[in-house]
Image (tube, helix red, strand yellow):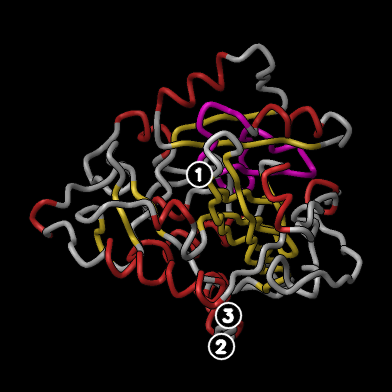
Amino acid sequence: MNVIWRNCICRLRQGKVPHRCQSGVHPVAPLGSRILTDPTKVFEHNMWDHMQWSKEEEDEARKKVEENSATRVAPEEQEPGSRERSASNPDLEEYSRGPRKAEQFPGSKATFRILEVGCGAGNSVFPILNTLQNIPGSFLYCCDFAPEAVELVKSHEAYSEAHCSAFIHDVCDDGLAYPFPDGTLDVILLVFVLSSIHPDRMQAVIHRLSRLLKPGGMLLFRDHGRYDNAQLRFKKGRCLSENFYVRGDGTRAYFFTKGEIHRMFCEAGLHEKQNLVDHRLQVNRKKQIQMHRVWVQGKFQKPSCWTPRSADEHALPSPD
């Protein structure tokens, strides 16, 4: 039943390559197998996996972040982002009260349920649906804050209400119910969503999502990592708070460390099964430019004995 995430988790062989190019030990997940062993061949491919930064590169990245965050957006000029606005959205009122477990709801007869948070226009929705065709009794939920995005998903020729339910939802609204009861999901996908939320609201969002999982259910996470090239490229005056920025289009971006992710998900009562920093080197062969990309990827499981009050008991010290 857990083929969705099991196919993404396996081990790489242990191997050694020059220290400058890559860590001496492969990570425990297949985050790519293209290893740069000869720096003179760096422009032969667009991306290299498992790159290890030199101390000089890390110091330079830290310096750039200190520089671009020195001038911050004044508090009175910080307009709330799309996920922070408190104004009511009439499209959300349909789900002001979620169904009870005894009631019928979309996917109520399914035996394996997945939720993708922040589905956008459905770039992941339809590949997932294609995979779920081989899993009897499966059902996919997908939600987004933007009504236009949800409509695009519903208008797609491959969308079927028999196998999928797309709905508008604001994950920052604690009082807004989901169109299914708590404790019904086997898998939640939270991919490049948490970074767009104000840091003060992140923990509440994770707590709420953890309640949606069945005991033994899994939350799969991937998002921006600290000192990613996207963070280094921000100009002065775009920083809202420490490691939190606003783009030109008004969207927000936070850049996480492995320890921050560990702390937030464990405080929500979930068990850490995987927590990796994915370092890659992206190159522009035409312009002969090299860019370090950093992402954080994790897998967190709801324990079989989970209760809302047990979250503090499962919280562990953050790793270094």
Distance of label 1 from label 2 (alpha carbons):
31 Å
Mark 2 neighbour density, 10 Å: few (under 14) some (14–19) many (20 or more): few
Mark 1 neighbour density, 10 Å: few (under 14) some (14–19) many (20 or more): many
Element at badge 1? Answer: loop
Q: Residue at x 65, y 11 (%)?
A: 157
Which percent across, then down, holds residue 117? 54, 44
Q: Residue furthest front?
A: 40
Which percent across, then down, holds residue 182? 58, 54
Give the mark nearer the N terminus: 1 vs 2.
1
Give the mark nearer the N terminus: 2 vs 3.
3
Q: Residue at x 56, y 55 (%)?
A: 293
Residue 271 lies, with reference to residue 299, above or below; the image says below
- In the image, is 259 to the left or to the right of 20? left
The residue that label 3 is drawn on is 310
Task: Give the label, 2 or 3, closer to the camera.
Answer: 2
> What span is colored magenta in the figure?
100-123
Distance of label 3 from label 1 (alpha carbons):
22 Å
**Main SS category, magenta section:** loop
- Residue 186, can we see it? no
Q: Amino acid at mark 1?
A: Tyr
Residue 284 occupies which quadrant of the picture? top right
Q: Residue at x 51, y 56 (%)?
A: 224
Residue 108 lies, with reference to residue 216, above or below; the image says above
Tell me, for residue 195, which label it has, or none: none
The residue that label 2 is drawn on is 317
Task: Work out whether residue 9 or residue 190 is closer to the camera in this orientation and state it.
Answer: 9
The residue that label 1 is drawn on is 178
